[in-house]
Image (spheres, grey):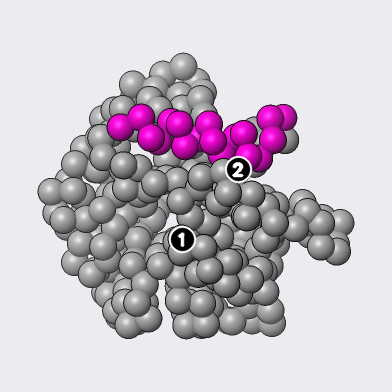
Amino acid sequence: MTRLSVNVNKIAVLRNSRGGREPDVLRAATVCLDAGAHGITVHPRPDARHIRADDVYALARLTSARGVELNIEGNPFAPPRDGYPGLLALCEQTRPAQVTLVPDGDAQLTSDHGFDFAREQAALVPLVARFHALGCRVSLFADAGADIGAARASGAERIELYTGPWAEAFDAGRPASALPAFVETAGCARAAGLGVNAGHDLSQANLAAFLDAVGRIDEVSIGHALISEALYDGLETTVRRYRAIVDRD
């Protein structure tokens, strides 16, 4: 069964645009879990543009109390700064079930590519080991067509397929053009003993077709589309609709 982890970053974006506490990230996460989400994802960035360290601590308490997974995404190479202790320190303090390592820089509006595993494998190996020492499962953000052998050699348990190109192809009316690379990469990962997650621009419109084509996906992390759809249909209803999609298998 594919598990649904809801990324609540966009709730924090709206809150931060005005200041104060509303909309409340913790309350929104609670609604998502009550509606059937299997876990919560956050991607705290060093510039605190959305999720902040205090949100991560609160969400760690919530997910621990509910017995569900917290997935913290981030760049393990980004140094600490005021208000951001660094990804490793956040995980030391919260012990998430999963940490997803993402090679994003401060200038990126959003995550838009995976690791170059052949080039970055040596740097990833000791980092993966440090997250393992905290009890975290480690997933690595990966492009379709990534070097799965090098990803496996890093010691991580999973990859997360960056699905932006799939969403773009789907919106352009040519979904079949993007699928072969995803199908092949997911198959290679599973053959190598890696779990496969997926995320970025997945939506109610394109998720089912992706899952049907690519095969077993352990977890999808969905935020931007889900929160956007929830503006029209409500958060609880939207999460339940996503559960209906991932529960089909």
Majority SS type along the magenta span: helix
- Whether residue 211 is visible to the viewer of this picture, yes or no, is yes
At 40% from the left and 67% from the top, the residue drawn is: 97
Q: Amino acid at mark 2?
A: His
Q: Taking 135 as reference, is 38 above or below it?
A: above
Question: Measuring 31% from the left and 55% from the top, which residue is drawn there?
Answer: 159
Q: Which residue is mark 2?
A: 224
- Label 2 Cα neighbours within 10 Å, binned few <14 / some 14-19 / many ≥20: some
Q: Is residue 34 left or right of residue 156?
A: right
Q: Secondary structure at mark 1?
A: loop
Q: Answer above or below: position of 163 versus 205.
A: below
Q: Amino acid at mark 1?
A: Val
Q: Which residue is mark 1?
A: 68
* Residue 87 % position (x, y): 50, 75
**Quadrant of the image occupied by residue 141:** bottom left
**Residue 96 falls inside the magenta stretch:** no
Which residue is at the far top? 173
